[in-house]
Amino acid sequence: MKLPALRWNKVSRVIQVISTAAAVTKGIMINTTRFPYWSIVKFDLICKEFEPEFMTYFDAHIIELAAREGFAQSWRTRELRRAPNDGLLEQEFCQIYQIDRPERFTGSTPSRPVAPATHKEPFRRDLVNWGRAFYRTLNSIEKDNRQGGCWARFELNFQGKPADESRFAANHARHMADVLKLPGVHRGWQLQHHTHELQIGADPVGRYMAVYEVDAPENIFDPSLGAERLPWESDRWGQQTKSVQRHFASMLLTALAPAKS
């Protein structure tokens, strides 16, 4: 796999794909108007025999995709199994791509049955539980240009009247802005599931998802109380909402293409 030219900050694990065009971005958050969609790909590596090869391959993979037309940036995460998670057990590894439209993934569906593994890519023997869902960014906010060590994901559903759903989303966005004021919380995205024929697997449990980039789970969840540090008190607006999942994942790698912002 031929990789684009890149800069690599080994401390923060942020890679910038080098381009001659000028970057127009605040911190490391890229324009969500031009690139409004996320593709979240999940899978498990059930045997860790070839984990080093697996890590090397998929680091290179997200770097390559970040440089392609229609891709703005990409991330790799790994679930923190001992964090204060709640809900269904998620796949261990995630690759997230910020893109201009879901059709960028046309032709990238894994083959069925899965092709036999080779010595060149032995880890493919152990890749299972593939899933891919698409989301549209409703709102994004960035407090500073620091990179956090993990992501906190909160999935929720709206259970009120359809006429109130837009107010629900606006109120939730304001709550996210308040969460960004907490120490160690650097940026956040408000996402809504986007149904598409290229999705792999079932719909997400929550139709909405808030993603926060934080230094550690403790920045957003108080382990001594077993509760969020700033819970969303949605009842104040007479709305019925339900948080259905909470997950924490460590950040493995971020690949940016700043000229596309």
Image (cartoon, rainbow, N blue to C red):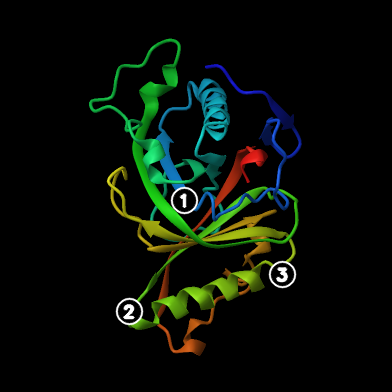
User: Given the image, on which type of amino acid does mark 2 rest?
Assistant: Pro
Residue 75 seen in this snapshot: no
Q: Which residue is mark 1?
A: 37
Q: Which residue is mark 2?
A: 162
First of labels 2, 1 by sequence position = 1
Q: CA distance from mark 3 to mark 2?
A: 30 Å
Residue 186 in the image: state x and y as whole percent: 70, 58
User: Given the image, on which type of amino acid does mark 1 rest?
Assistant: Tyr
Residue 259 in the image: state x and y as whole percent: 66, 39
First of labels 3, 2 by sequence position = 2
Q: Secondary structure at mark 1?
A: strand
First of labels 1, 3 by sequence position = 1
Residue 72 seen in this snapshot: yes
**In this image, 44 relative to 195: left or right?**
right
Q: Residues within 10 Å of mark 1 (few under 14, many from 20)?
A: many
Q: Which residue is mark 3?
A: 181
Residue in the foreground of this view, choosing between 46 and 113: 113
In this view, the mark in front (1 or 3): 1
Q: CA distance from mark 1 to mark 3?
A: 25 Å
